[in-house]
Image: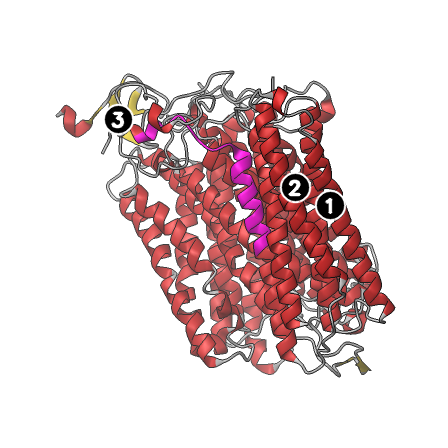
């Protein structure tokens, strides 16, 4: 008889072979760990590249040992050429934005915990999920291959502006094959994230366990869901941009290159292309991408703070609606990246207004978090410290966004280090702190071991102080007119700023070195860390803490949990303490009711 | 602050059209109010049903991006050269629309077959094969259209108008090939008697969407080229 009912979920049997278990696994938990490992490798790569750049900016003619191994022509004798500086900058930005900030908080933690937090056995399309990771991994390999193929990676920056991205090798090293590899890599990355978003959306909408209404989802699950909706829209638009750019390179089309363009004394064969077209396609993706990087962090740190505050946020709904508002508004503000592109001033005005408006949900989120903290007895641990650090970075970096949102001020600051300071703090470091917070919080559930708390706290304070030492002076440099993307500062007016650059470089080297503490803690704890006292070491309420540590193959050991409570029932009296878990049928009273 | 449901959730049978769907919360419920039985709905749409709309949304976004690129590119310079669309496109359009009709016939016959009334439907797969054939015919027809353009000296890089023609038709054909893969998947499942209704419905929706997308693209190309 034909099967007429049931879901399309292909519940797959537990794998037995090593390959199916650890390499080409269909298990969302393994895929989440694979994404995390990829992000870790990418983050270390991106950090080392930033070290090279910082050393070069502070000591312009100093040879950097080993640099010539990366490029023979780009670093003769270990001294960086200006072109090679731009190539490293491009790779640093691309690796960090795509393969760290998108991959870790969204794809890694989301893959591992979203199905468990909704009570599902797996994602509905595990094969697509596996494909999502391996396509993303291939994208990383393609990107990194540009170091050894042709004349190196592209030097056009992570935004790859036209016409530089389309005129070929005449524009400089890496602008031929390097750009094609970059476009192919990002095109592949888009496919991977679209497949991931498909799974995230269907998991959240269709696989929630009985009793798990949308408003009972934890804030982290909401953040992943909203991010996947953003990813679906944004990556589907970037991919056409990449296809058009590749065609300009390999097929001789003219989408992005204008007529009679002369590059390095060579008239380009293209005609009539629109350089602004790329910017529209890119930034329609690019600005939501900023929120794709940060919204999962907002959800993760909210989830962690609530657990450690032992009380829910002042308003669960307000936070969810604000996440949603960020997602919607993120598509209406993208033109603010193009204030200096020469577009119609009325367009600037139209993009400026939502840019100022988007600060409202951001502010609401932070205020709800901060006022919820007021009066709580916060448990201080590595996860909660990094969550506080997240808020601190998000606020400190976000405040400069108020200035940049206004076209008249942005014209002055746009090409300076002010912008570099702004986006590194609000999106880069804040998101990194979200990743760290998530790691310290969920590590016991992911591996069955606890991380070392002392090392975690040392790691936090080094990173927190270090990040401020690196990125706050960037704002000062920007206000002093220090242009960005320059490989060296030889102009007279920039000379007095060199000591600031040297301070930043030393801070960057030390802060980067402090990440080795984290790396040691991560690897050591994975194998030799203390065993958690029970399945719920943080006394948390959401479903991931209801199951075994680490969770079994089907997440809940053949059972289907039933959800009886809102996600954050803290400050109550129950048989287990001051909280009641979502899957517990226990009737509880609030402390107020008890009195 | 803390509110609870004190009893295990009950199934609201009135809103559970397919009792086979169990264990899920159901996305229709947006209201979390504890004690409200709507939170305990024991029904949610099958993921393939949701997924196909998600896929369609991504495809729409992609072609919307190409459409805006076409409009911007045409307006950015005077080098745009219009040309007459190959006439075979209209025949291809007819073939694709016809394939939607045959798939709809197939879907109904398979539904009757799966409903257990086998005696009334002898060969439920026949119309699926017809649809598959028409789909392949459409892709072959598109290939003939490209050959026609080549014979006129219009290549991918000849002009932005021909660039967009090749690009949009090729990407649409790729998506149609994806739909053909879906049809083969359905045929395989049907032959093994393990086909699920929602798999058939999702494939049919995608196929009809390909038809609508093609009608849109034809209109766009006809107006802009």
Above or below — where is A552 with respect to B86?
above
x then y, percent, for residue A346: 44, 79
Magenta stretch prevailing secondary structure: helix
| Residue A145 tag number | none
Q: Name the residue under label 1.
A: B134
Determine the CA span between mark 3 and mark 2.
Answer: 52 Å
Q: Contact, CB < 8 Å: mark 1 with mark 2?
A: yes
Q: Mark 3 points at which residue?
A: B4
Determine the CA span between mark 3 and mark 1.
Answer: 57 Å
The residue at 56%/77% (across/down) is A341
Colouring scheme applied when the structure was drawn: secondary structure
| Sequence-wise first label, 3 or 2 | 3
Q: Which chain carries label 1?
A: B
Magenta region = B38-60
x then y, percent, for residue A508: 57, 55
Q: Say whether residue A189 is left or right of residue A305.
A: right
């Amino acid at each position: 008889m034909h099967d007429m009912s049931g879901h399309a979920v292909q519940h797959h049997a537990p794998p037995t072979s090593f390959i199916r278990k650890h390499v080409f696994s269909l298990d969302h938990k393994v895929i989440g760990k694979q994404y995390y490992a990829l992000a870790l490798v990418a983050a270390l790569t991106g950090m080392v590249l930033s070290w090279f750049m910082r050393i070069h900016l502070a000591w312009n003619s100093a040879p950097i040992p080993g640099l010539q191994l990366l490029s023979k022509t780009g670093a003769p004798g270990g001294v960086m050429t200006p072109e090679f500086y731009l190539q490293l900058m491009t790779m640093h930005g691309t690796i960090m934005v795509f393969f760290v900030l998108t991959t870790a908080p969204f794809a890694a933690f989301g893959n591992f915990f979203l199905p468990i937090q909704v009570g599902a056995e797996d994602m509905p399309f595990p094969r697509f999920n596996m494909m999502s990771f391996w396509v993303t991994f291939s994208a990383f390999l393609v990107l990194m291959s540009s170091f050894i193929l042709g004349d190196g990676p592209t030097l056009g920056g992570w935004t790859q502006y036209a016409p530089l991205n389309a005129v070929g090798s005449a524009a400089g090293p890496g602008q031929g094959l390097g750009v094609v590899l970059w476009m192919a890599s990002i095109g592949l990355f888009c496919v991977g994230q679209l497949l991931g978003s498909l799974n995230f959306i269907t998991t959240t909408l269709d696989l929630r366990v009985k009793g798990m209404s949308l408003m009972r989802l934890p804030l982290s699950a909401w953040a992943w869901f909203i991010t996947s909706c953003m990813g679906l829209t944004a990556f589907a638009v970037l991919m056409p941009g990449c296809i058009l750019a590749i065609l300009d390179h390999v097929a001789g089309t003219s989408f992005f290159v204008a007529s009679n363009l002369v590059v390095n004394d060579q008239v380009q064969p293209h005609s009539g292309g629109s350089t602004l077209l790329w910017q529209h396609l890119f930034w329609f993706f690019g600005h939501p991408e900023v929120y794709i990087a940060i919204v999962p962090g907002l959800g993760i740190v909210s989830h962690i703070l609530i657990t450690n505050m032992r009380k829910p946020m002042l308003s669960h709904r307000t936070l969810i609606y604000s996440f949603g508002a960020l997602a919607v508004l993120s598509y209406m503000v993208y033109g603010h990246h193009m204030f200096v592109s020469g577009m119609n001033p009325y367009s600037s005005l139209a993009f400026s207004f939502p840019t100022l408006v988007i600060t409202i949900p951001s502010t609401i989120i932070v205020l709800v978090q901060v006022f919820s903290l007021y009066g709580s007895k916060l448990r201080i641990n590595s996860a909660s410290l990094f969550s506080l650090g997240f808020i601190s970075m998000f606020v400190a970096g976000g405040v400069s966004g108020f200035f940049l949102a206004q076209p008249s001020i942005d014209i002055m600051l746009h090409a300076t280090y002010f912008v570099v300071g702004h986006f590194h703090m609000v999106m880069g470091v804040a998101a990194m702190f979200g990743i760290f917070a998530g790691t310290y919080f969920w590590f016991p559930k992911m591996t069955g071991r606890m991380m070392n708390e002392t090392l975690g706290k040392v790691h936090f304070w080094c990173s927190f102080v270090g990040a401020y030492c690196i990125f706050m002076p960037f704002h000062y440099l920007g206000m002093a007119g220090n242009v960005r993307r320059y490989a060296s500062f030889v102009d007279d007016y920039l000379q007095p700023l060199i000591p600031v650059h040297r301070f930043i470089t030393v801070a960057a080297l030390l802060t980067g070195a402090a990440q080795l503490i984290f790396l040691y803690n991560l690897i050591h704890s994975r194998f030799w860390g203390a065993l958690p006292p029970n399945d719920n070491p943080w006394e948390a309420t959401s479903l991931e803490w209801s199951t075994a540590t680490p969770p079994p193959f089907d997440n809940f050991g053949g059972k289907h949990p039933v959800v009886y409570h809102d996600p954050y029932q803290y400050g109550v009296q129950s048989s287990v303490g001051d909280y009641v878990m979502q899957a517990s049928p226990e009737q509880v009273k609030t402390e107020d009711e008890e009195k | 602050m803390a509110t609870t449901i004190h009893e295990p959730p009950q199934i609201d049978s009135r809103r559970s059209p397919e009792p086979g769907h169990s264990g899920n919360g159901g996305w229709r419920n947006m209201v979390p109010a504890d004690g409200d039985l709507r939170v305990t709905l024991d029904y949610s749409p099958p993921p393939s049903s949701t997924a196909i709309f998600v896929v369609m949304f991504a495809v729409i976004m992609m072609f919307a991006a190409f459409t805006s690129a076409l409009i911007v590119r045409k307006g950015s310079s005077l080098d745009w050269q219009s040309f007459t669309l190959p006439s075979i496109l209209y025949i291809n359009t007819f073939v694709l629309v016809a394939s939607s009709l045959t798939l709809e016939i197939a879907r109904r016959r398979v539904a009757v077959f799966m409903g257990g009334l086998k005696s009334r439907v002898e060969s439920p797969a026949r119309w699926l094969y017809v649809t598959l054939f028409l789909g392949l015919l459409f892709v072959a027809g598109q290939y003939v259209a490209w050959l026609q353009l080549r014979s006129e000296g219009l290549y991918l890089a000849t002009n932005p108008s021909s660039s967009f023609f090749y690009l949009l038709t090729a990407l649409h054909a790729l998506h149609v090939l994806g739909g053909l893969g879906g049809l083969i998947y359905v045929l395989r499942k049907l032959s093994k008697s393990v086909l699920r209704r929602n798999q058939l419905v999702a494939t049919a929706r995608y196929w009809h969407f390909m038809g609508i997308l093609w009608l849109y693209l034809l209109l766009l190309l006809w107006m802009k080229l």
